[in-house]
Amino acid sequence: MNTYKHEVKYYECDRMGVTHHSNYIRFMEEARVDWLDQLGFGFEKIEAENVFSPVISISCQYKRPTTFKDIIEIEVNIDKMSEMKFEFDYTMRVEGKVVCVAHSVHCFIENNRPVAISKRLPDFFKALTERISDPA
C-alpha cells in the first residue's frame, strides 16, 4: 500500500508554530480512509451496505514536532483483526524521521448493533485479514 502524505497547513499549527496535537487524530483518519480506498473497500462502499466502523480507542505518541508546510508521510498497517473489530498502527514520518506513532481500534456495527464482519461482508473481511501484520 502507498503511504498517505499530508502537508501541514498553517491553521493546523498553534501559536508556537508547531502542529497542534489534536490534528494527528485527523491525519490518522485521512490516512485510514485512503488505505481502505486503496484496498478497494472505501467508506462509501462499506457504508452503502449499512456497515460502519466507529473508533472505540485511540492513542498517539508524539516523537518530534512538525511545523507549517512539513510533509507528513503516514504508513498505515492493520495490526489485529477479529470478526467484530480491527486495529490499525500508524507511523508518521517527516524526511524519514518518525514524528508520531499511533494506534486506533474500531468495531463494526449495523443499525447501531455489533456485527460479525466475516459473515456480513466476507470479501471485506478476507481483504483485511490478508493485510494483517499480527493475527489475533
Image (cartoon, grey):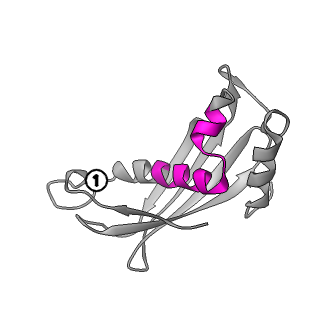
Q: Is residue 68 above or below residue 23?
A: below
* Crowd around label 1: few <14 · some 14–19 · many ≥20 (10 Å): some
Q: Amino acid at mark 1?
A: His
Given residues 110 and 55, the one toward you in this image is 110
Secondary structure mostly seen in the magenta stretch: helix
| Viewport quadrant of the C terminus | bottom right
Q: Would you say residue 131 is visible in this rendering?
A: yes
Residue 36 is covered by the magenta coloring: yes
What residue lies at 73% left-to-right and 61% top-to-bottom?
131
What residue lies at 42% left-to-right and 53% top-to-bottom?
27
What residue lies at 56% left-to-right and 42% top-to-bottom?
57
- Dot 1 lies on which element? loop
* Position in image of residue 30 (x %, y %): 46, 51
Region of the chain picked out in magenta, as a range: 29-47
Residue 98 is covered by the magenta coloring: no
* Position in image of residue 102 (x %, y %): 51, 58
The part of the image, by quadrant, that contains residue 44 is: top right
Given residues 40 and 124, the one toward you in this image is 40
Q: Is residue 73 above or below residue 10?
A: below
* Position in image of residue 71 (x %, y %): 34, 69
Left or right side of 92 for 103:
right
Left or right side of 135 for 102:
left
* Position in image of residue 98 (x %, y %): 44, 73
Given residues 71 and 15, the one toward you in this image is 71
* Residue under label 1: 20
Left or right side of 97 for 134:
right
